[in-house]
Image (cartoon, helix red, strand yellow):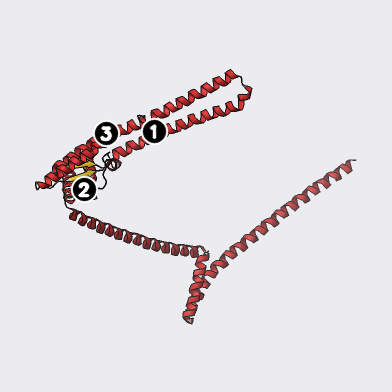
């Protein structure tokens, strides 16, 4: 803590000295935790580490469950066991408990695998961050750049001195450059110069923010229009499909219930509007009636055909029965004659 206050005190002295000499002191800061959370490589590695930690926790829980089971069994059987067996089982349980605590400390302790692997994951990114900070400090003449997430206590920090986003952009640029063509590299450099100009000029940053908001509003308007057009097209397709289905139903001689109700509504409306329009409605009804009569006629023919087949079958059975009785009578007559 003394070293921190001493460092701040010296920084203030240097700043005051520089101001007294007429030089403007530039101070900035970064948030290392924020930067790490926005670097894709670190996030992926951290997710893998969290899966490992979850697996370790499950193993510890399994060990705890086994130990509790042994304790419960010993408690239930204690009255039936000798003192030697009780001591042996208690020693075994104690050994398993110590083994579980050692495993827990090994994985999650102050110097455990979780802490060490987190540090190993963060170190390459931190090295890149330090390099990026030095580049920014040299290019933009910063005198001091602090780390907000370190042990250094910052009681207040103005957001306009935060260069964390600039550092993230530099890290992302480094990753992208390896996969870009010459033309893409040129476009990337133009974009970088534009971003640097925005970083240097807060007014330009506000203007860029307004432009981005307008662009977002314009894109939303275009999207809304597209959705509206799709809705109209779907409505048109549904109406066209309904008309085709109604025509097909009339062609096959079967009119669906929705079509009938629609037709009746149209007829009623025509009568209400003008008495002369009732004739076309009646004609439509007349057109539908032959189709219905035709279906009834087909049904009548089917019933008649079925009746004829049934009568024919009955007649055949009667003939067979008569022939059988005749044969039996002939046989009986022959037997009587022989006797």
Look at 39% across and 31% down and name the residue there.
108
| Residue 171 versus residue 92 in the image, above or below | below
Question: Can you identify the residue that label 1 sits on?
Answer: 52
**Image quarter of residue 84:** top right
Mark number, residue 123: 3
Image position of 201 (left or right of 291): left
| Residue 274 versus residue 189 in the image, above or below | below
Image position of 110 (left or right of 191): right
Mark number, residue 161: 2
Across and down, in percent, residue 8 comes to 21, 41
Quadrant into which the N terminus falls: top left
Quadrant into which the C terminus falls: top right
Mark 1, residues whose alpha carbon is within 10 Å: few (<14), some, or many (≥20)?
some
**Image quarter of residue 230:** bottom left
Q: What is the spatial separation of the Cα atoms under label 2 and label 1, in whole angstroms?
A: 38 Å
Q: What is the spatial separation of the Cα atoms under label 2 and label 3, in whole angstroms?
A: 25 Å
Do the CB atoms of the residues marked 3 and 1 lie less than 8 Å apart?
no
Is residue 180 at least partly visible in the picture? no
Image position of 214 (left or right of 66): left
Look at 32% across and 36% down and name the residue there.
45
């Amino acid at each position: 803590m003394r070293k921190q206050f001493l460092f701040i005190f010296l920084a203030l002295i240097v700043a005051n000295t520089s101001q007294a000499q007429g030089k403007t002191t530039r101070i900035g800061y970064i948030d290392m935790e924020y930067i790490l959370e926005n670097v894709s490589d670190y996030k992926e590695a951290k997710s893998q580490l969290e899966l490992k930690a979850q697996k370790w926790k499950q193993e510890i829980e399994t060990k705890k469950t086994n130990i509790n089971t042994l304790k419960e069994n010993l408690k239930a059987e204690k009255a039936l066991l000798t003192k030697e067996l009780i001591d042996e089982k208690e020693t075994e349980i104690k050994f398993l408990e110590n083994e579980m605590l050692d495993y827990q400390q090994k994985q999650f302790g102050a110097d455990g695998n979780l802490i060490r692997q987190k540090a190993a994951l963060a170190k390459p990114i931190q090295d890149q961050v330090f390099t990026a900070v030095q580049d920014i400090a040299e290019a933009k003449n910063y005198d001091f750049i602090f780390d907000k997430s370190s042990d250094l206590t910052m009681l207040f920090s103005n957001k306009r001195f935060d260069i964390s986003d600039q550092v993230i952009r530099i890290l992302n640029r480094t990753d992208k450059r390896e996969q870009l063509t010459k033309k893409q590299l040129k476009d990337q450099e133009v974009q970088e110069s534009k971003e640097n100009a925005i970083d240097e000029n807060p007014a330009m940053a506000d203007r860029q923010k307004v432009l981005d908001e307008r662009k977002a509003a314009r894109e939303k308007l275009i999207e809304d229009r597209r959705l509206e057009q799709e809705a109209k097209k779907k409505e048109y397709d549904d109406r066209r499909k309904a008309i085709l289905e109604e025509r097909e139903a009339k062609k096959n001689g079967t009119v669906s219930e929705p079509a009938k109700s629609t037709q009746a509504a149209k007829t009623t409306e025509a009568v209400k509007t003008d008495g002369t329009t009732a004739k076309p409605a009646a004609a439509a009804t007349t057109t539908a009636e032959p189709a219905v009569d035709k279906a009834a006629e087909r049904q009548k023919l089917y019933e008649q055909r079925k009746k004829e087949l049934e009568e024919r079958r009955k007649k055949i059975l009667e003939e067979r029965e008569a022939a059988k009785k005749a044969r039996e009578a002939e046989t009986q007559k022959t037997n009587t004659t022989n006797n």
